[in-house]
Amino acid sequence: SVPFSVLKCHAYPIKTSFPLEDVIESQQFNRDLLNGIFEVAQDMEAIERDASSPGSSMLKGYLMATLFYEPSTRTRLSFESAMKRLGGEVLTTENAREFSSAAKGETLEDTIRTVEGYSDIIVLRHFEGGAAKRAAATAKIPVINAGDGPGQHPTQALLDVYTIKREIGRLDGIKLGLVGDLANGRTVRSLAYLIAMYPDIKIYFVSPDVVKMKDDIKDYLTTSGVEWEESADLLEVASKCDVVYQTRIQKERFGERIDLYEAARGKYIVDTKVLNVMQKHAVVMHPLPRLDEITVEVDNDPRGAYFRQAKNGLYVRMALLKLLLLGW
Amino acid sequence: SVPFSVLKCHAYPIKTSFPLEDVIESQQFNRDLLNGIFEVAQDMEAIERDASSPGSSMLKGYLMATLFYEPSTRTRLSFESAMKRLGGEVLTTENAREFSSAAKGETLEDTIRTVEGYSDIIVLRHFEGGAAKRAAATAKIPVINAGDGPGQHPTQALLDVYTIKREIGRLDGIKLGLVGDLANGRTVRSLAYLIAMYPDIKIYFVSPDVVKMKDDIKDYLTTSGVEWEESADLLEVASKCDVVYQTRIQKERFGERIDLYEAARGKYIVDTKVLNVMQKHAVVMHPLPRLDEITVEVDNDPRGAYFRQAKNGLYVRMALLKLLLLGW
Amino acid sequence: SVPFSVLKCHAYPIKTSFPLEDVIESQQFNRDLLNGIFEVAQDMEAIERDASSPGSSMLKGYLMATLFYEPSTRTRLSFESAMKRLGGEVLTTENAREFSSAAKGETLEDTIRTVEGYSDIIVLRHFEGGAAKRAAATAKIPVINAGDGPGQHPTQALLDVYTIKREIGRLDGIKLGLVGDLANGRTVRSLAYLIAMYPDIKIYFVSPDVVKMKDDIKDYLTTSGVEWEESADLLEVASKCDVVYQTRIQKERFGERIDLYEAARGKYIVDTKVLNVMQKHAVVMHPLPRLDEITVEVDNDPRGAYFRQAKNGLYVRMALLKLLLLGW
């Protein structure tokens, strides 16, 4: 189990029973905490379905600032929907990098000290790794990391684990196939990290050679007692797994080597052939956006879970907003 | 009368008595439906004036996503005001084309399936004709087309007809002068289409030769029993009409032929000379924005109806949001 | 005392007891009016701290449009937070210049006449001096100037004076050091103008030669009976003042003369040496954003008042929204 990082010493600590003051990185979570968050997330499903329930106004009077230095419509709308589904209000910036004082040379810390005067919680998306930690160290109000460059995107990791639990019914003994860009994918790295907390996990890595999983995660899994292996046979892996987690090959990582990109991109596609060998209870996940690494036929199969996964992002973010502002 | 297009088969059909699940194109409307919508729109005028009326919170708990792939501040603010005047909430994107996953190659359908998880109704503005129909076919929640490229902009067409009704007091027997860019103007084409449903309509086309009304609409009017004629004499037409509907000559349609643009632009101006021949009950309309095709002197005459027309967009959109979400 | 400018004749005058219909320029304010606004601003501090107080919903049902033709995230978020802390709602544009009909050649007046149909109060940021006055002359609803190019930024001036009052406890007999870019700084010019209404004021100008305070303000101060002097010795000035008001040297004013900019920029820095000579009750202010003209060590000293000053912008804007929409 991973100890909580104490990221800051609040001048005026928020008095809630929730052990975290900010959500910055996956390392802040252990199994008990994840289980607690997931229970709240599941309660949120009922609140979202019924706008007249008392829970729908639990954050009335609270103001969330979404400070996005890098546009990400999906993540922003998901957080803003989460806040509004709980009766809270939102201040929004779609492109803080271009439109704000950052363009005049203001430090992130100064921006945070201003914005914390106008809001109750800050959701930060930034292009620099470590930005969220710096923001949290400055702010007296809670900060949620909505992705900081090559760094972390912890709410994505939480929603991925939550989705496995909701789709498969458990987290122990999961067989997980990670497919696609495993070298650059922030998502698969965080997911491997979190799932390693559970017993009897088996992970298969299926990726083109140029974007293989890096040694740090492999070493971490080995140390944590997680079985893993690399495979070039997607069909065989798919037939064994509970979850096939596909990812997009990111063109921008290949620079001028378009030939390498094209080769990598076409190598492992999840299509009906893959579906046909998968078990009935198994699911296909994807952090989205997808290009053609999952064919659209898969959308119509109940095992295509990626849009439900996106929706789970709403519930997990509702839970985190509730917990950071109101406690358990 | 035009049959309703059945645009999609909802997996979970919304149970309202309103016959439309989405608002995508003018062809969805017939006279009875327009009359019903206009009655609701008129009720909305009272609700908008009195924020303490119960109607002002009829959409409390509902969340509208304005997904704008092409910026259009006027249309966006009008929809967002409509939603908020009824107590609803808004998730907004000012420039989804640049800022969203579309830039990474995500399909519109995938974006819609994600955003429908975060909201209750989607207002879509897109740069491609047919985009709204594709979105509606995908979404399980209602979609309103707020303009899709060279395609349709049905709420503009509705507010134009509503304005004629409110200003002139009827829709039967209207004499309508369409002036300016009739070749490229989406607005005048849709208006001609809708007004043709009413009896005893007479339409005059007044436009520079390079931007004359196209044959498809002329043929449609003839088939529908609508009298129409072309004229080069704006003063004569203005003296006969109930409504002079002026439009902007769109520079971007002329490419490098700035000479043709300048000639077309200056040819038919609505000014005090035109006002002086107009009847007392007649009005000047314009979809806005205007450049100098209506002089500012006309603003001060009670027959200058274009800002009231813009305001009517609010009432019509309030009505559509109410009807799509709550039914009659 | 300065007479109120009567900026427009409302067709339907808003019936409130507040003497201003719009907030456009510092010249609209006199001492009595400032005192009244500051009392309301102080009440707002309590409302902001307690979201369950009745005051937190005093603007329920009101809709503010933030029409920003020039991005300014700090100012925009501050206004939007102010509106939401009072229970009001917001329509927002982050970049109206690029995204709106202005790009198609629509006049500001036409935009205003449209937007006033969708909202109850307009907050305008514009790149042209005089834009706010033109907007106010057009609109039937209140307009607040949130900065118009080289023109005015009256709410910044009000929050500066309010901060002096809150920090020092009075406005009479203040000794004020204005430091940095005094030639181009809209802020320091407005502050000098407003503070001159109070008795026994002494102002010190400390600036590099290339950006010295201009004669118009010096003449105005002399005429108003305010003592002022120029000094090149920041330490001596700091030791005498109640308020050291530092400003950023604006690189964009120097064009290609980077050498002049660098020389000016490094000349007067507020650091611990300055703090050490300042009196215990004195404070350092800055309109933000700052670069390195105040070192970060000063942030930790209670006399560093600039983030409290930014927060005071919230209270002053809450007060103005309340007063313009509801009256005293």
Image (cartoon, coloured by chain):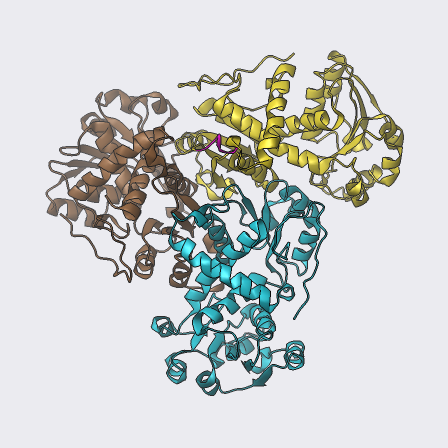
Chain colours: A brown, B yellow, C cyan
For the C terminus of chain A, give its image quadrant: top left
Q: Main secondary structure of the magenta part?
A: loop
Left or right side of C242 for A178: left
Does A301 sit above or below residue C159?
above
> Which of A2/B276 is in front?
B276
**Residue B279: x percent and y percent?**
85, 29
Q: Is residue A103 visible?
A: no
* Residue at 58% in and 85% down: C229
Q: Is residue B57 magenta?
A: yes
Image: magenta residue range: B56-60
Residue A19 placement, left or right of A320: left
Q: Tell me residue B63's x, y (percent).
A: 45, 34
**Residue drawn at (16%, 38%) of the image:** A229
Image location (x, y in percent) of residue B4: 57, 14
Residue C178, image x, y percentages: 53, 77
Compared across the picture, whether B125 is left or right of A289 comes to: right
**Quadrant assignment, res B185:** top right
Name which residue lies at 48% across and 66% down.
C288
Examine the rendering and report whether any part of residue C169 can be seen.
Answer: yes
